Amino acid sequence: MLEHGGRLRRASAVYGIALERWLDLSTGINPRPWAGEPTPLTLWHRLPEDEDGLAQTAQEYYGAPGVLPTAGSQAAILNLPRLRAPCRVGVLSPGYAEHAARWREAGHEVVPVTPAECPDAAATLDVLTLINPNNPTGHRFTRTQLLRWHGEITARGGWLIVDETFADTDPAESVAAETHREGLVVLKSLGKFFGLAGARVGFVLAAEPLREGLAERLGPWTIAGPSRAIAAGALNDRRWQNETRRRLRADATRLAALMRASGLAPSGGCELFQWVVTARASRIHERLARGGILCRLFDAPGSLRFGLPGTEEDWRRLETALPAAVDEASP
């Protein structure tokens, strides 16, 4: 079982702090999610139907020629490796660990790739899996870079997979509109920007043959009816999206400033989280956790990722606790 953020029940048991007393900054999920109308009871009573318009709504939102709704981006991460014979797969490192784990599990040779190594990887490997912006570093690739690497790798029958889970906050460099091209696969999720991780809704943007192959593997009813309705409402709410992008940009700036003032200048990040490499990562993580604040600890390299506080009370709590934790963790 790979480590992930948001494991509050385990943290509650380890530190003896009740669930409701935690400030969870470990996931990079928008702490103020989209909230629409309650779902009708009939959606809980009937089987989900693909003809409900969700795919078309997602196409319009992402500006993509075709989409496949999935149970979060994780469903695609788990199943895409099963659509290819064993080959050499480059996976961005450091990055979301599920990508490398699932390709390796399916029998592929996984090659860790840093951003600087991507040009060579595109010229030599069969599949290149990138995250844009990256989790946890926040590194961004330009649209021009991605399309150039796509051209190189697909000339040999390969794939470029771009995980755009965190891209909704600033989609300017998204390659979603280009996914009619064979071998270009984009993964999307409603979990981060929309704050709807529990709905388990994602989308695969790709040319039709790949979407059909993945759909056949996933089978029917991959997303619950109520989740489909919630997703459609969120994707259609342009006013909320625009207001949320402005707020997240401001909050990201505020979080970075708070961290610098506490002696933890960010090493990277995006609108939904800030990331810092520090030799004191484990000690700071431990001291914050003892006070009921959960951030995300990484081992390679030793680093911490902080999501955004959701309320002014949460901000004040972090503003008080972080400098103290940094001081206590000093040699």
Image: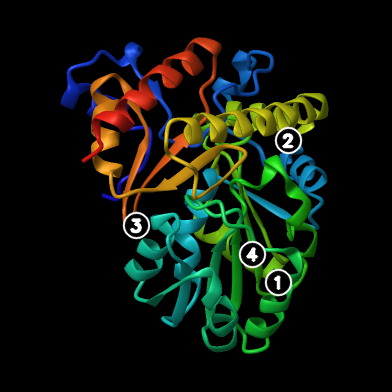
- 126 in relation to 256, above or below: below
Q: Residues within 10 Å of mark 1 (few under 14, many from 20)?
A: few
Q: Secondary structure at mark 2?
A: helix
| Structural distance between the alpha carbons of marks 3 and 4 | 28 Å
| Residue 93 in sight from this viewpoint | yes
Please state if 87 lies on the left or on the right of 54 as rendered.
Answer: left
Nearer the observer: mark 2 or 3; the answer is 3
Q: Secondary structure at mark 3?
A: loop
Quadrant where the C terminus sits is top left
Which is nearer the N-term, disc 2 or disc 3?
A: 2
| Residue 194 in sight from this viewpoint | no
Q: Nearer the viewer, residue 13 or 214?
A: 13
Nearer the observer: mark 1 or 3; the answer is 3
| Structural distance between the alpha carbons of marks 2 and 1 | 36 Å
Could you say where residue 78 lies in the image, as x and y percent from the top left?
44, 57
Please state if 100 lies on the left or on the right of 38 as rendered.
Answer: left
Which is nearer the N-term, disc 1 or disc 3?
A: 1
| Structural distance between the alpha carbons of marks 1 and 3 | 26 Å
Q: Secondary structure at mark 4?
A: strand
Do tag 1 and tag 3 residues touch (Cβ < 8 Å)? no
Q: Residues within 10 Å of mark 2 (few under 14, many from 20)?
A: few
Q: Residue at x 32, y 67 (%)?
A: 105
Q: Which residue is mark 2?
A: 52
Q: Which residue is mark 1?
A: 145
Q: Which residue is mark 4?
A: 185
Q: Which residue is mark 3?
A: 301
Q: Residue at x 64, y 64 (%)?
A: 185
Q: Amino acid at mark 1?
A: Gln
